[in-house]
Each structure stands twice: as structure tokens, then as C-alpha cells.
Image (tube, rainbow, N blue to C red):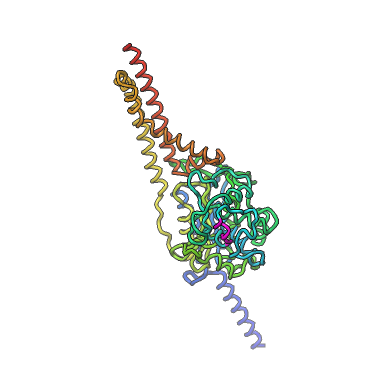
Amino acid sequence: MVAEAGVRVVVVVSAVVALLMCAVPVAGREGEVPAGLGGRVDAHVEEFRERQGLGGVAVVVVHRGRVVHAAGYGRDALGRPVSADSVMPVASLSKSMTAAAVLWMVEEGLLGLDDPVVEHLPAFDPVDPRGRRITVRHLLEQTSGLASQGLLSPDRAHKESLDDAVRILSGMGLAAEPGTAHRYFNGNYWLAAALVQEVAGVPFADALRDRVFAPLGMGDSASVPAGAAVEGMAPGHLRVLGMRPVRGLPPDLSTGSGEVVSTARDLGRWLAPYTGAGRSASGEVFLSEASVREALAPGTAGGDYTLGWRLLDDGRWAHGGTEYSHLAQQLLSADREWGVAVLDDTFSYLDTAYPLAAGVLDLAQGREPAPRPPANLYLDLALGAGVASSAVVGAVRLRRARAWGGRLAVRPRWRALVASVPVLVPAGVVVWLVVLGAASGAHPRTVWAVLSGGLVPAGAMVWLAVAALSGVVVAAVRWRARARAGAGQV
């Protein structure tokens, strides 16, 4: 009896010790979740959001295939609190998901990474004969040789469907031999999406749902046409001169390259197989470990772009996403034990999503995040000073406009025209940009999104607009004064 009681005591004590060891993480032990991580992440994200002037942010942290922290911060453009379940566009993070769908098909034996695209996608009929040598791998690592051809590139025209995209890409020449150079180009992933759609025999959105989202439990994620209304999703913000006006997405086709909407919690499930040997958060095999390694391996052209991911100099993997109203970022630690994703509903010219994700990953790995200066604030101050200076110069010129007209009333007309050129240069730039946008064939809302912050900082466009408007007004008053002075002399 005594021996039996002793055994029971040992068993009970052992169980208690085991429970305590599971319940209380030991800070500093490699591979474990630091104690109090959630609180430190919350404090860091809130401070970062306030310092950088962001609206709503959602963050998720993943460790060895399981979500250890997911939360939202701030409010969205509709005034609602942002949570880990707030739906936002992930933009170009979609590329890694498209690549995952392709890898699934490779594992199923439906195609091979080194198969020529034309073997599986008959609609792709490249006019450049080199295009027939483009492989599936070339598309995913963006070494196909296809590239944008400038502001008037055919791929910038408005597209209604993947069929339109494939037709446009078929008519474009290559900028390099396939497999020789990396060129980041959304068209590669339009072709990859068309390929998935063709092989699966269902619309790409359904294929992505069935092959990626459903197996990973990503119930709030979907591939939807850009600019389409999504239940529960708020518009985003555009940062301009310290303000955050509300902004929606233009209808610019980006199927396969950027049309996924998701939540921070779902992105945690998405990162699970990349930090958990190919298994989903529920423990089921999503991709083999060999396919995960393939996805993260450096490209054949020697660049840092893998299959839908980017290998960073410090050994981590990442992929950012930029929309005209949102930013996003996903980040894996070098040992692939940690993953972080960030959704940010404020578009700013200088990226804020990656610095935030990097800081959260530092906290997860027991490091203190590097301080991040409010770079966008400094940019806003500089551009705001430019706007103010143009307004002041315009006011001074306007006061002197009548005297200017009187002086040039007796001079030849060509002299007055030449003298007017400096004040009309900003207006000329505006006209040139508008003409280029119209000539590109893009949807008017897309052109507006590009010109009001997508091409250069939004504050710079405000500066240009103020300079252009003041220049036109000054020129008009000058010429009216010249005409009156000339009539008086007659």
C-alpha cells in the first residue's frame, strides 16, 4: 500500500510539473513563444500605428504552424474597430497563393514546373517565338522575359477577363530570353492564373478556393474582381499631406497577381504550412515539405525571387502587397519557425507594412525592434512646404500680373508667349499625364488612382495641381491685362 501510494504521488507530481512547463513558456529558450508576446506586440503595433499616422491595422503571428497572436488596431474607413477578422485586400500577396495552387497541381501530376506553358494553355499563342519556351517555373519566378513596355505598354489597357489578359500578353514581345533575367511583372501571374483555370477546368477563383483556401480553413478569403463590393470590407485610405481621405479600389484586373481579399486570422492559417513542414493549422498535409522548399528556393536566374516569394538578404522570406488604398506584408523567419502578416488600410508612398511586420517578427524572436522614424510624416512636411511655396509664389505673381501685362503690351506677341512659358509648365505636365493616362487605355478610375498617388506621392500631385492652377490663373490675368493695355494705347 505504501509503495502504491508513493507511485501515485510521483505520477501526480509529474503531471503537475508537466502542466506547469506547458503553461508557462520559458523566455529565451530557442523555438518557444516568449512569455507576454501578445502584449508586447499590441503595444508595438499601437505605437507604430500612431507614429506613422495609419488608420486600421491587423496583425497575425504564427509559430510552427499555429497562430499564437492575431489582433486588429484602430478603426476602418467606416469607423468600425479593426479586428483580426476584418476583410482587406492582400494585393500582391496573392502571387504566393497562386503559386501554391500551381504547386498543388504539380503534386497531383497535372503539370510540371518545367513544362512549357503553351502545352497546357492553348490560348497563349505568343507572337514572339521565344515565348513558346516559357515554362511554368518561369512564370512563378518571373523570369519569362515578359515585361511592361512603359507607360503605354499594352498590358496597361483595361481588361475584363483572363481571356483578355492572355490575348494581350500573346501579342507582346519578350524583353529577354526566358529564364535569363528576373523582371517583376503582373502579367506572369495572369498567365499562371489562366493556366490554373485551364487545367482545373473551373474559374480561377473557384480553383483557388478549392485548392488553397478550403484546405487551410481560410473561410473569409476569396479571389474577387478588383473594385468589386465585398461584404464586410471597408474602403481604405490614401495618405496625403498628413490626412487620410477615404479611397476605394479601381476596377483593374489583377486575377492571380492581386485580387485576393483576406483577414489577418486567415493569413495566419495561410502561413501555417510554411512554418509547419507543409501542414495546415489543423495538422493536415497541405503541401509536401519538398514543395514548400521548392516555393522558397532561389530562382534559376540567380535572383532573389522564388516561386511567389522573395528571399531577403538576411535569409528571411517575404512578399509585399500594394493597392491604391491598402498595404500588406507577409514575412517568414530564416529558420521558418515564425511567420508574420500585416494588413494596413492606409496607402502611403513609403511602405509601412514591411517595417511593421519586421518589428513584430523581431519581438517574436526575442529581439528589440529597430526604431522606425515617421518617414511619411517627413515626406508630407516637405511636400506641404512645396505646396505652400507654390501658393505664395502664385499669389505674388497674381498681384503683379496687371503690371506685367502693361509692360508687354507694346512688345511682340511672341515675347509675351515666351515669358508665359515658365508659369504654364506645371499645367503642361498635368495635361501630359492626363493624355498619357487616356492613351494607355486603362479604366478612368485606374488612371485617376495612378495619377493621384500611385505614380508619385499624393502630396506631390497636390503640389503640382496647385502650381498648375495658380500658373493658369496668373497667365490668364496677365494676358487680359496686356489686351486691355494694348486697346488703351490704340
Quadrant for the C terminus in the image: top left
Question: Could you tell me residue 61's position as x and y percent?
Answer: 54, 61
* Residue in the image at 41% along x and 28% along y: 472
Provide the residue span drawn in magenta.
129-136
Up-down: is 390 above or below 46? above
Q: Which of 67 and 158 is in front in this view?
A: 158
Camera-side residue of 45 and 111:
111
Question: Magenta stretch: residue 80 in it?
Answer: no
Residue 4 coordinates in the image, percent (x, y): 66, 86
**Residue 281 seen in the figure:** no
| Viewer-side residue, 52 vs 401 | 401
Q: Would residue 453 appear left or right of 111 to someone viewing this image?
A: left
In the rendered view, tell whether residue 104 sits above or below residue 352: below
Whether residue 402 is visible here, answered yes or no, is: yes
Q: Which residue is drawn at 43% across and 60% down?
A: 369
Left or right? Give the position of 462 relative to 444: left
Determine whether, in the image, residue 285 is placed left or right of residue 373. right
- Please say whether residue 131 is one of the residues in the magenta stretch: yes
